[in-house]
Amino acid sequence: MKKNIALVTGGFSKEAEISYKSVITVYNNTDKEKYNVYIIDINSEGWWHIKDNGEKILVDKNNFTITDNHQTIHFDAVLMCIHGTPGEDGKLQGYFDMLQIPYTSCDAATSALTFNKRFTVAVASFGSIHVSKSVMLLKNNFNDNDASKIIDTLTFPVFVKPNNGGSSIGMSKVNKTEHLIPAIHKAFEEDNQILIEEFIQGREFTIGVFKTKGNILTLPITEIISKNEFFDYEAKYLGKSDEITPAIVEEPIAEQVRTAAKKIYQLLNCNGVVRIDFIYNEQNKQPYMLEVNTVPGQSAESIIPQQVEAMNWHLKDFYTALIEECFN
């Protein structure tokens, strides 16, 4: 008997736009011979199942079921495809835990931790992972006069970014101290907490990591060469970067990145597919972790599908592996 899979998309943040792109790829490549797949759109207006004909059916939040043609449909598992809140920060994971419905992402604790860049960096550094020096600011405790203290603490250039969230929304690279305050205000428009971290010179790599049959595997590494000054929203989603998959990189460097990625996956108790971004500092000959994406993009332009293809896997087999693993 085929299992019922809820493919959740949407979300409450600006990243919902990416979620709706990702869900197309995932839905088109989920094995319909093995699973009954139901797209569930979770947004600020409500929770709905979207049928192929466009009809919307309200989700019963009491038990996460839908009723179609007088038949109540219960879900055996959830395929997570929401970037940002509430699908990447642990909120939905906690809800599904209470309902005892398995899902294809990190659990509530890990999702909440990794959604907070500062907490992720702190835990990673405790695990002997190389990270950039950084400072966190709270909106209700910051005034422009505090900028001088930051200037004395960090070496420029620096990145200023919202502490929670992804997709590089609200992020700036600051080369001169006089540009710091505008960048801080820009980031505070997206989040009440922001992170300012020192720029690390080097090659930018990103790598997918996932678990299948209890084993942690890495996908082929991608090197990011941004046409903008850094890997911002345009570079990620609007074609303003060259993404070389698999990366043309010496095997000792590649092995360092793979080893660090697996260690981070274990250290943070990750599940499902996770994408981890690194800068490889050629002077120190070490990979520095930038951030962890627990619900990485799955659109046609996204990196994980590129890496799966480079591994000579079909996306259908890959998503099947993620679904089957969540039952463990």
Image: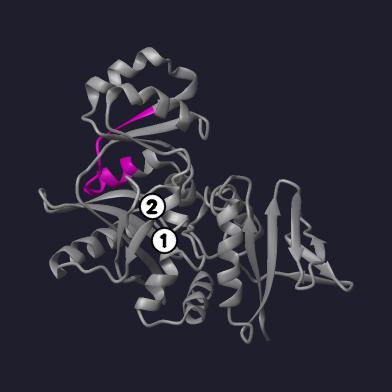
The answer to whether the residue labelled 1 contacts the one labelled 2, judged by CB atoms less than 8 Å apart, is: yes
Q: Which label number is shown at residue 27? A: none
Q: Position of residue 127 (x, y in %)?
A: 25, 48
- List the residue tagged with mark 2: 292
Point out the stretch of residues depicted in magenta: 121-136
Quadrant showing the N terminus: bottom right
Q: Position of residue 314 (x, y in %)?
A: 46, 82
Residue found 13% across the figure and 52% down from its top: 282
Q: Which label number is shown at residue 274? A: 1
In this rendering, would 123 be left or right of 82?
Answer: left
In this orientation, does residue 17 appear? yes
Residue found 56% across the figure and 71% down from its top: 26
Q: Earlier in the sequence, mark 1 or mark 2?
A: 1
Residue found 40% across the figure and 77% down from its top: 309
Q: Position of residue 272 (x, y in %)?
A: 46, 65
Name the kind of residue labelled 1 in the image: Val
Q: Determine the secondary structure under disc 1.
A: strand
Q: Residue furthest top?
A: 145
Note whether 184 is above or below 123 in the view shown.
Answer: above
Name the kind of residue labelled 2 in the image: Val
Label 1 CA crowd tier, 10 Å (few <14, some 14–19, many 20+):
many
Q: Residue furthest right?
A: 70
